Image (cartoon, rainbow, N blue to C red):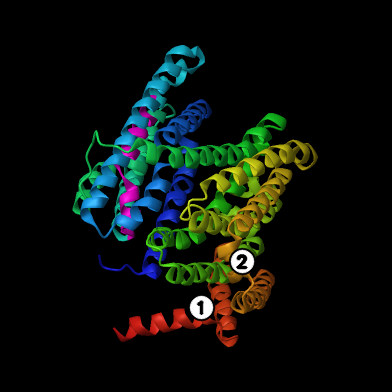
């Protein structure tokens, strides 16, 4: 198989992750003005409700499939057998998810007002399964899924403006959302046959697959519960206004964080393949590169977002959400911890089959996070929720790092990592200076924000080059090679 460029894949996946989060932010200002408050309530509840069944149908199979399938990707016969077994398990889980969904719709009378919208959203369950996106991750085919995602997002925006025109058009909005998220997955299923044959099979090694799948699934459930608990508890203890303010902060934070994580997650199949084939030296080299990259990207992203928090909220949400500035500034620091935690978990614990430790760490963090929310929300409302998230992300980063210490310990203690951190801190001082000077000298919100971002990137990169940072020099060399070509 032709070796893929990690740099190109990182850029493409970062773009795709950002696009997935930008779509609702681009469409929300329009639909919130067109649809009635009741219609938005039906839409939001139905979307949240169906996500639990999407999670059940997924079973954590995607993470497991990438870990195990990566080592077979150069053998078409073995990857075909493996993919067919995983697809069969996924289909059975999907059928169970649908049966449970229909049972709840019949049993619980208070869901009857939402049946139509829930059924529209339920299309996501099947289409997520047949999309077999884990195949594309195993083969590092990020070009295809990124281009496909961009096309369907653009088509969805056109459909939104054409079909959502009245206060009760929430069914159209739900259908367009499904089309944007999973509409192309039927194409995925057929295109995946160019890599391997996928079919239902009776010869499934249930004993081998189910235990790790259930452990990863339990960890996914724990993550979902502790991530969702912040907003749920805030709504219970405070009011809709507090949830709205915090929601904007979380959306902004999620966009920037996903762009960073999108640059890193593309290394997971490569690492899984290397560890599966016991190519430990190469595995450690790629892991070192991943940690080095995050060391010089995570801190400036956080510092830049904190410095421009007011400008970002004004541009995305407007003046009525300005009370969320502090919560955004607080939760931004969780981005550094969550991305390091993701590396320790997805790049070490899962590939080395330590999903049991991952589950333990997630459960501990989830319980502490729920407790912190009940303590901090009554004191500081949405700012307290943001603080609990930062503490929780720091905790799970520490726990995952300890569980992966035999691999990540030598890297984190290395001279190269310390140098990267020092270079990053010096570069961030340049970002703070640039943002402060522009706040003092330019009154135009848009112009100030654009110049702040452009000049901050420039000054940060220049400082890294002056410090003779290895990562900066590597990127410069790649740029030079592109120009020569």
> Is any atom of residue 205 visible in this view?
yes
> Which residue is located at x 33 percent, y 41 percent?
182
Please say if 242 is above or below 423. above
Give 460 or 52, whichever is nearer the viewer.
52
Residue 133 magenta: yes
Task: Return the mark for residue 314.
Answer: none
Main SS, magenta region, reads helix
**Which mark sits nearer the N-terminus, 1 or 2?**
2
Give the magenta range.
Answer: 119-142
Secondary structure, mark 1, is helix
Give 428 or 423, whichever is nearer the viewer.
423
Q: Distance between the Cα atoms at labels 1 and 2?
A: 20 Å
**Apparent side of residue 272 relative to residue 425 in the rendered image (left or right):** left
**Apparent side of residue 8 relative to residue 263 in the rendered image (left or right):** left
**Apparent side of residue 368 relative to residue 298 in the rendered image (left or right):** right
Disc 2 target residue:
409
Q: Split into 4 quadrants, where in the image is the C terminus? A: bottom left
Q: Split into 4 quadrants, where in the image is the N terminus? A: bottom left
Please say if 359 is above or below 279. above
Give 396 or 153, whichever is nearer the viewer.
396
Secondary structure, mark 2, is helix
Disc 1 target residue:
471
Q: Position of residue 231 (x, y in %)?
A: 62, 37
> Which residue is located at x 58 percent, y 56 percent?
341
């Amino acid at each position: 198989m032709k070796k893929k460029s990690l740099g190109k894949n990182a850029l493409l996946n970062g773009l795709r992750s950002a696009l997935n989060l930008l779509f609702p932010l681009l469409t929300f200002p329009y639909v919130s003005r067109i649809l009635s408050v009741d219609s938005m309530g039906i839409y939001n509840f139905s979307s949240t409700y169906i996500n639990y069944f999407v999670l059940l149908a997924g079973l954590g199979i995607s993470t497991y499939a990438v870990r195990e399938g990566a080592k077979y990707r150069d053998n078409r016969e073995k990857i075909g057998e493996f993919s067919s077994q995983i697809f069969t398990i996924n289909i059975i889980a999907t059928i169970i998810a649908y049966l449970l969904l229909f049972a709840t719709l019949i049993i619980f009378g208070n869901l009857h007002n939402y049946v139509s919208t829930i059924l529209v959203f339920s299309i996501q369950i099947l289409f997520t399964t047949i999309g077999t996106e884990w195949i594309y991750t195993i083969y590092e085919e990020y070009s295809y899924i990124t281009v496909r995602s961009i096309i369907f997002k653009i088509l969805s925006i056109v459909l939104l403006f054409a079909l959502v025109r009245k206060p009760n058009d929430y069914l159209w909005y739900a259908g367009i959302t499904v089309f944007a998220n999973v509409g192309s997955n039927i194409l995925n299923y057929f295109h995946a046959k160019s890599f391997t044959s996928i079919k239902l099979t009776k010869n499934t090694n249930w004993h081998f697959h189910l235990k790790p799948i259930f452990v990863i699934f339990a960890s996914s459930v724990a993550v979902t519960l502790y991530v969702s608990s912040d907003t749920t508890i805030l709504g219970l203890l405070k009011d809709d206004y507090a949830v709205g303010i915090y929601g904007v902060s979380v959306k902004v934070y999620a966009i920037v964080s996903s762009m960073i994580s999108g640059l890193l997650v593309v290394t997971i199949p490569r690492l899984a393949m290397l560890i599966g084939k016991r190519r430990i030296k190469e595995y450690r080299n790629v892991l070192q590169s991943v940690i080095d990259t995050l060391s010089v990207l995570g801190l400036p992203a956080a510092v830049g977002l904190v410095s421009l928090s007011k400008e970002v909220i004004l541009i995305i949400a407007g003046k009525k959400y300005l009370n969320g500035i502090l919560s955004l500034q607080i939760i931004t620091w969780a981005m550094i911890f969550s991305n390091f935690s993701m590396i320790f978990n997805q790049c070490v614990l899962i590939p080395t089959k330590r999903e049991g430790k991952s589950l333990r760490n997630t459960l501990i963090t989830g319980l502490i996070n729920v407790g912190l929310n009940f303590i901090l929300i009554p004191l500081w409302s949405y700012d307290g929720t943001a603080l609990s998230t930062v503490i929780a992300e720091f905790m799970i980063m520490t726990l995952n790092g300890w569980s992966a210490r035999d691999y990540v310990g030598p890297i984190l203690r290395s001279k190269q990592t310390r140098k990267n951190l020092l270079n990053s801190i010096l570069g961030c001082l340049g970002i703070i200076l640039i943002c402060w000077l522009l706040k003092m000298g330019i009154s135009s919100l848009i112009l100030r924000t654009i110049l702040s971002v452009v000049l901050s990137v420039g000054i940060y990169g220049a400082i890294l080059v002056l410090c003779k940072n290895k990562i900066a020099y590597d990127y410069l060399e790649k740029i030079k090679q592109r120009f020569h070509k």
